[in-house]
Image (cartoon, helix red, strand yellow):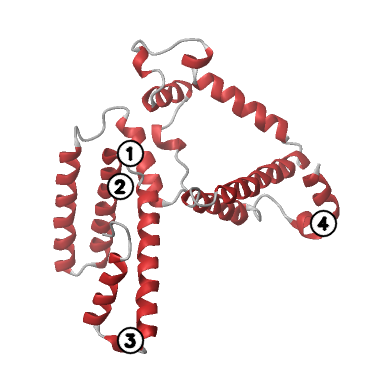
Amino acid sequence: MVVAKLRAECPWDRAQDLRSMRPYLLEEAHEVLDALDAFEPDPGKLREELGDLLFQVYFLARLAEEQGAFDIEAVAEGIVTKMIERHPHVYGGETPEDSSLAGTVGAWEARKAARRKSGSRVDGVPGSLPALLRAHRVGEKVAHVGFDWPDVTGVLQKIDEERAELEEAMRSGDPAAIRHEYGDLLLATASLGRFLGVAGEDALREANARFEGRFRKVEASARAAGVAMEEAGLDRLEAWWQDAKRQEVGGT
């Protein structure tokens, strides 16, 4: 097995432990996200990055095995068992009274809740998730017990409410209040994504990419004009920005 050989013979691999591997796992997961975004022009990139992420799983399992905890076979067996238990509508067993709900997220969460001995429904959302993604997941979980707005209109009204409270905090000049109300506004916006069927983390990542791409074109326009960005002036920068948007298909 490659991982076992690396642990035995490579000084760098031998030096790693469960804590030191954390940043590499996070990096590889994010590279998979980038590859998903680039799948249409380059599907091979996703294959490569999935391999890198899979290696992290094997490596971490090997570290656990060396400590006498479990091995990669136990990891695989565990997830297979869990998926079978969570899909009784596919593998047989009890299903919700309303069979139309059998394959829904709500049914999935209900089965998880039934196996939870104690604690909160939101305990299973990792605290280390990016904040926007965690807000989305927590919102999904509490919505399954009816703790949610009845429709998107309620969310939009909440956003307006939080925006007004942020403006009030800004007028007060209280940094703590501003931070608090800004956080509430972001949380309400994350809830809007759930109602629109849009993952906020994905939408913001794509918006970041659009912004960065357009800004690079603004920089290129400044270089072509022989003008330093700092000296171009806002009107000229805005004109180049609009040119960059027009170069995109359906740019907004």
Q: Which residue is mark 2?
A: 190
CA distance separating discs 1 and 4 = 45 Å
Residue at 62% in and 55% down: 24
User: Helix or strand or loop: what does disc 2 sit on?
Assistant: helix
Q: Is residue 172 left or right of residue 247?
A: left
CA distance separating discs 3 and 4 = 50 Å
Tag 4: amino acid:
Cys
Image position, residue 95 (x, y; %): 42, 12
Image position, residue 125 (x, y; %): 44, 40
Q: Nearer the viewer, mark 3 or mark 4?
A: 3
Q: Tell me which label, 1 or 4, sits earlier in the chain.
A: 4
Asked if 192 appears above or below 177 in the picture, the reply is: above
Residue at 45% in and 27% down: 118
Tag 3: amino acid:
Glu
Label count reads 4
CA distance separating discs 1 and 3 = 43 Å
Q: Give the class, few, some or many, for how many residues have Cα within 10 Å of label 2's Cα (few <14, many ≥20).
A: many
226 or 67: nearer the eye? 226
Tag 2: amino acid:
Ala
